[in-house]
Each structure stands twice: as structure tokens, then as C-alpha cells.
Amino acid sequence: MRVSTNQYSQMMSSSLNNNSLGLNKLMQQMATGKRILLPSDDPMASTRAMSLQRQQASLSQYQTNIEQADILLKNQETYLSSSVDVIHQMRDRILWAGNDTNGPAEREAIASEIEQLQETLVSLVNAKDENGKYIFSGNEVNTKPLDKDADGNWVYNGDSGVREVVVGDGVTMKINVNAGDIFFSGGADLFNQLDELVAELRDPDFNPATNDVLERSLNTLDSTLNSLAGAVTDMGTRQNSLTTLNSGHAEVELFNNQLIGQLEDLDYGEAMIEFNNYLLALQATQATYIKTSNMSLFTMM
């Protein structure tokens, strides 16, 4: 078969161009460290890698949510644990108030201490997070959970709303407890009962033997302590669950990164071999083209 000079020139030019394109692409791959520069380079691997990257983005969001939830749960646990300490101190004062040797001065001192402890407890219940939102008011985060109404009675102003965050694929975690469930549930009315107790202690005619306010206050305190203990335990359990979930997400994230690397990353050893082959082929084609371009048509026939 005879090949014309023009055909031969086109063949050599095409070969030079293909080798040059292949070399340039390989150089881009080596510069980026990625085998896949465009989805068309390996459609199946590219599709799989993109799916894994989407999963990685979800895992990253879950981990962010877990971190924020853990901070909130720890803050709540701290405030609730402090509330437990305050109520234990109140309980000690009430037990001391039942001593029939106390006179008006001693009872006044006890009443003042209980008032101060109550103020501390109110401040704990009305605690805010770093964004200035009330922690224990359910979903009414802009409303002070505990305050007095127009009649001077303590009332819970929040709601029973549950705040949840997504911490996994189809997994949500409750991240709040409201003051109403702890201090006003089951007919308990701790803060108003404390006001009544303080008023009774300041009554000159107060007699612990005939007045049941001490017993009622102790019962309410014990009930509240049980609620607080349950809430604190629940906070700890949820934090442990978050830690376990976060560890699982980290392991999956690491595994996915390895898979993505296997799909996308360039094997530099193979790339260098291919680079040398392209370079040799390009040099050989160039040399052949230069040599044959000076030959006559009769020599080529």
C-alpha cells in the first residue's frame, strides 16, 4: 500500500499530538496527585468517589452537631448538678429549722439562708447558653423559664418542647430538659413552697411540732432531687451515646478517605513509568518525523 507524503505527514503529526496530549495529562495528574481529573477519565470510579464524598460531608455535619450537642448537654449537667448541691444545702437548713430549741433569731437566720439559696437556685434554672438563649425553657429559648407572675407566685413560662439534633443517618438526639418537668411536675411547686416556708419561719408563733410546712418542704425537696438525679443521669447517658456515635463516624470517615484515595489518587510509581514511555515515544516520533521529512517520495515508496 502506498502512502502519500501528505498522508504520512498527517499520521506523524497525529502521533506527535496524541503523545503530547497524553504527556500533558500525565503531568497534570502528577501535579495534582489525582488519577481522575475529569469524570470521563473513569466514570464508574468517579461516580463512586462522588458518592463517598457526599457521605463524608454528611459525616462532617453529624460530627459538628455532636460537638455542639455535647457542649449543651455538659452545660446542662453542670447547672443541674449545682442545683442538686443547692437543694442539699436547703434540706440541711430545713432539718435544722425543725429543732425546737431555735428561737426567733435562729429561725430568722435560717430563713435568710434559705432565701439566698433559693435565689441561687433561680439563677441556675434561668441560666443562658453562650448565645444568650435560656437553657431550661423548652423551645421558648427567648423566655425566662422561671419568674413571678402579677400575684407574686412563681410560674414556669417555658414549654415542654423537645429540642433534637441529627447525629447520624436517621438518628436524632434529644438535647434539652425543661425546668417545668423538674420543678413543677406531679403537683410539685418547690419555689412557692419555699416562699411559704420562709414566711412561716419568720412567724413569731411558729412551732415546728404543730406546723407541717417543714415536712411538706422536705418531701418536695426529695421529689425534686429525684427528678434532678434522673435528669443528670440521662445527660450522662446521652453524652456517652454521642461519644460512641462520634467514634463510629470517625472510623467510617477514615475508611471512606482510604477508599476515595484508592479510586482517585495517582500511583506515582506507575505514573513515572508511563511518563518515561510517553517521553520515549514522543522523542522517537519526533526523530522519525525529522528524519523522514527530508526523504524523497521515491525513497518512501
Image (tube, rainbow, N blue to C red):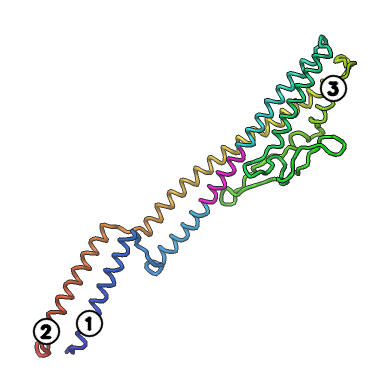
Q: Is residue 167 above or below residue 3?
A: above
Query: Is 84 on the left-hand or right-hand side of 53?
Result: right
Residue 213 — which label?
Answer: 3
- Give the spatial CA distance, label 2 vs label 1: 16 Å
Residue type beneath disc 3: Val
Specify the amino acid type for callout 1: Met
Residue 36: x and y, percent? 37, 64
Image coordinates for residue 216, horizontal then vertical, percent? 82, 24
User: Residue 11 shows which numbered tag?
Assistant: 1
55 within the magenta span: no
Q: Quadrant of the C terminus?
A: bottom left
- Characterize the local packing of mark 1: few (<14), some (14-19) or many (20 or more) Cα atoms within 10 angstroms: few
Residue name at image x 72 percent, y 42 percent: 137
Q: Is residue 161 visible?
A: no
Identify the secondary structure beneath mark 2.
loop
Question: On the rendered structure, is 8 left or right of 85?
Answer: left
The label number, if any, that marks residue 294 in the structure image: 2
Q: State yes or no: discs 2 and 3 in contact (Cβ < 8 Å).
A: no
Query: On screen, 260 above or below 81?
Result: below
Q: What secondary structure is the stretch in magenta mostly built from? A: helix
Tag 3's secondary structure?
helix
Nearer the observer, 145 or 53: 145
Mark 2 or mark 3, earlier in chain:
3
State which mark lies toward you, 1 or 3.
Answer: 3
Tell me if mark 3 has few (under 14), some (14-19) or many (20+) residues whose alpha carbon lies within 10 angstroms of its own: some
User: What is the distance, in whole Å, between disc 2 and disc 3 at their CAs?
Assistant: 118 Å
The range drawn in magenta is 59-73
The quadrant where residue 195 appears? top right
